[in-house]
């Protein structure tokens, strides 16, 4: 009688943990910047103040180069460049040039991307507890 050995493997070949590799789109991506999905095929670009970011670049890449992106759903703390001063506990939202900023007081809807865990000066890095983008509407 012939014995049959069946081997099973985890078939999660198209899933990722808290990091994923993307190609930089038509413009360069700087390190520690918020990134958004580009409308083309599987690439990212630096997010702006009005964009919905998916993660933070952990390295830099020229157009077309591959880069690592730490997803905002990560259970790890992440670092991001800030456009202004930040205090520990501040809610952070996207700013221009892929940076983060504190939640503005002006009317509008802003997407929270995390909470600052430390104080940080303008144009420096801050450690954050990331979260999936949460809308905050300010009506004064």
Image: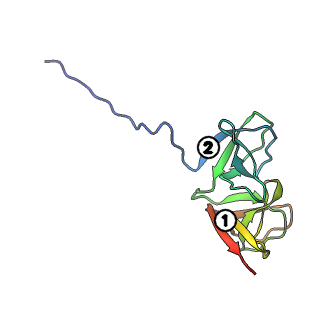
Q: How many dots with numbers? A: 2
- Side of 137 relative to 3 (left or right): right
Name the residue beneath numbered marker 2: 20
> Up-down: is 68 above or below 81?
above
- The percent coordinates of residue 34 (x first, y second) are 73, 54
Name the residue beneath numbered marker 1: 114
Marks 1/2: CA–CA distance: 19 Å
- Side of 20 relative to 61 (left or right): left
Question: Quarter of the image containing the N terminus?
Answer: top left
134, 57: nearer the viewer: 134
93, 69: nearer the viewer: 93
Local crowd size for mark 1, using a 10 Å CA cut-off: few (<14), some (14–19), many (≥20): many
> Up-down: is 41 above or below 126?
above
Q: Quadrant of residue 131?
A: bottom right
- The percent coordinates of residue 61 (x first, y second) are 78, 39
Whether label 1 touches label 2, CB < 8 Å? no
Q: Does the rendering let one see residue 112?
A: yes
> Up-down: is 2 above or below 27?
above
The structure residue drawn at horizontal position 42% and vertical position 36%, both measured from the top left corner, is 11
Q: Secondary structure at mark 2?
A: strand
The structure residue drawn at horizontal position 54% and vertical position 48%, both measured from the top left corner, is 17
Q: Does the rendering let one see residue 89?
A: no
1, 73: nearer the viewer: 73
Q: Quadrant of residue 118?
A: bottom right
Tell me how the rendering is colored. rainbow
- Side of 133 relative to 2 (left or right): right
Q: Secondary structure at mark 1?
A: strand
Local crowd size for mark 2, using a 10 Å CA cut-off: few (<14), some (14–19), many (≥20): some
């Amino acid at each position: 009688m012939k014995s049959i050995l069946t081997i099973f493997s985890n078939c999660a070949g198209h899933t990722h943990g808290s990091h994923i590799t993307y190609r930089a789109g038509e413009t360069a991506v700087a390190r520690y910047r918020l990134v958004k999905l580009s409308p083309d095929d599987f690439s990212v670009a630096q997010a702006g103040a009005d964009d919905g970011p998916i993660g933070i670049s952990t390295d830099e890449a020229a157009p077309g180069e591959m880069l690592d992106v730490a997803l905002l759903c990560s259970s790890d703390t992440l670092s991001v460049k800030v456009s202004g001063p930040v205090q520990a506990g501040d809610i952070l939202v996207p700013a221009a040039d892929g940076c983060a900023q504190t939640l503005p007081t002006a009317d509008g809807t802003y997407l929270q991307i995390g909470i600052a865990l430390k104080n940080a000066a303008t144009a420096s890095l801050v450690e954050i507890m990331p979260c999936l983008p949460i809308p905050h509407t300010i009506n004064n």
